[in-house]
Image (cartoon, helix red, strand yellow):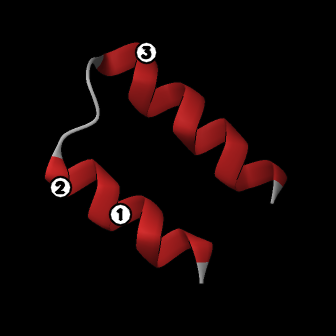
Amino acid sequence: LDAYGNMVSVLRAQGPLTDDKRKLLTELAK
């Protein structure tokens, strides 16, 4: 779960959460 939080932070730092990023996070959340 920590890795998931880190990933969210990285993606947010890169810019707005796009659909592609949401799909990626959904995959990671499984």
Q: Residue furthest left?
A: 19
Q: Is residue 8 left or right of residue 27?
A: right
- Residue 28 location (% of width, % of height): 54, 71
Q: Quadrant of residue 8?
A: top right
Residue furthest to the right:
2
On the rendered structure, is 20 left or right of 27? left
Residue 18 higher or lower than 27, as above or below: above
The residues tagged by marks 1 and 3 sit, at their Cα atoms, a distance apart of 15 Å
Residue matched to label 2: 20
In which image quadrant can residue 17 be found?
top left
Residue 11 x, y percent position in the rendering: 41, 32
Instruction: Say which residue label 1 marks.
Output: 24
18, 13: nearer the viewer: 18
Q: Are marks 1 and 2 in contact (CB under 8 Å)?
A: yes
- Disc 3 designates what residue? 13
Q: Position of residue 20 (x, y in %)?
A: 17, 55
* Above or below: residue 11 compared with residue 12: below
Residue under the image location 18 percent in, 41 percent down:
18
Q: Residue at x 28, y 50 (%)?
A: 21
Tell me the element at label 1: helix
